[in-house]
Image (tube, rainbow, N blue to C red):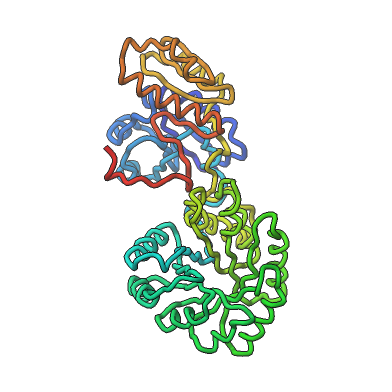
Amino acid sequence: MAEHILFLTGKLAEPALQRVLETMPGRQFTYTILQLGVSVAALMTTSLIKRRVLDLFNANKIVVPGRCDVNYIELKAHFSIEVLQGPDELKDLPQFFSTLPCPEKKMHNNIKILAEIINAPLKSIDQLCREAAYYKSQGADIIDIGCLPNANFPHLEDSIINLRELGYQVSVDSVNPRELIRADKAGANFLLSLTEKTAWVAEETTAIPVVIPEAPGQCISLRLAMEKLEKLGKRYIADPILNPISFGCVRSLIEYEKLRRDFPEVPMMMGVGNVTELIDADTLGINALLIGMAAELKVEYVLTTQVSQHACRAIKEISVARDLMCTAVSDGSLPRGYPINLLSLHEKKPYVSEYPEIMELAAAIKDPSFRIQTTESGIHIFNRDGLHTATNPFALLPKLDLKGDVSHAFYLGVELARAQIAWQLGKRFVQDRPLDWGVSEKVTNKNNED
């Protein structure tokens, strides 16, 4: 027997809700729509719903509009059936009821992130600890201390000890074998990066070494270094080195694939900074693609930096990307439809209404408050006095009778500017809400806001 769902709504949204439910592809439930006598569905309250829903129409579930601020536990107890918070936008109902993976689905995460603190010898222990705390908050699993070839590092040991006492796993990246031996004695977990010539360091240390080619592209030397560590019976991580675009990036990816094919059980590392830091392009999509390839290759460790200002979200981007990509690879699915995504500049469904629907809604408005929506044709602003459309907010100003209301003009200016940005990029605009930039958004300190 098909599930029967009771949808609660308001006067303005009722026609649109009816259309969405009637045309929903693959709908596997029957439904009743109950209009509760409020113009705007978001104004429903817990008490109003309890007072006005007097018949459940034999429903198994109740769906409340997503923007309603109600107590779902109280409503469930009152009606004795499940009460769900629906999506914010009616157009998202098909996805809400789809069979795509849901937030409760177990996510897989098989990649550890090493976040490198560059120029570590030039920083105090307090600076290193603060940077480590920030990197961990962004998703790093291991803090990598980046040494400098010609700089003394007298506080190396104390830096490692302090970071370890704070609960961090620590790796040390140095071309100086003696520095790596010092790091091992201080308690480092990983040593980057040994070569065929410096593989002897593994004999004198207990930390896990990461081995690399003598020079980019010299993968024979990498395999010789691996052989030496195999003979020592040492656990190690192999890193063929990912080269920048124009300098053998594709060739190095092929070497990763060859290494994985020949050594299916050997842990591998991929340093993605050579690509993301050295290209004038947004890093989000690049990191997503690189982590997707790393997941396919079963790379266990990814090393990243945040040096260039345009790469300042790299750790967070990789952290989110590994959840999506590792889960998709594990499921044998495309990285689509999961409860997380890496969309930032664009949306899969940027527009919640089409122009005929906006015309219908505008005709039903009886109050002076302005509503703003976007469609492919532009920005639409409307109230009881009319509907106006433009692609440039300045073209709308002469058509709005604001009667010298400065605060209202400021509000509309902010909202129309957001709408214009959303329309230009193909993002979703929702009035009275900031644009959603996903993982690319800078985290602000609310305590410092006025």
Is 1 placed above or below 420 here? Answer: below
**Residue 394 in view, yes or no:** yes
Classify residue 246 as left or right of residue 362: right
**Up-down: is 108 above or below 151?**
above
Picture coordinates of residue 316, whole percent (x, y): 47, 54
The image quadrant of residue 240 is bottom right
The residue lying at 43 percent from left, 57 percent from top is: 138
Seen in the picture, residue 389 relative to 427 is either above or below; the reply is above
The number of numbered badges drawn on the structure is 0
Give percent across and percent down for residue 402. 35, 12
Q: What x and y, as percent, mark residue 429?
A: 48, 31
Whether residue 68 sits left or right of residue 362 in the image: it is: left
Looking at the image, residue 54 lies above or below residue 224: above
Q: Choose between 246 and 287: the one closer to the eye.
A: 246
Mark yes or no: residue 6 visible: no
Specify the quadrant that holds the N terminus: top right
Foreground pick, 28 / 338: 338
Front residue of 223 and 103: 223
Q: Quadrant of the C terminus?
A: top left
Place of residue 160 in the rendered image (x, y in percent of width and height, measured from the top left): 39, 74
Q: Residue at x 70, y 67 (%)?
A: 257
Give me the residue at 36% from left, 24% from top: 411
448 or 65, which lies in front? 448
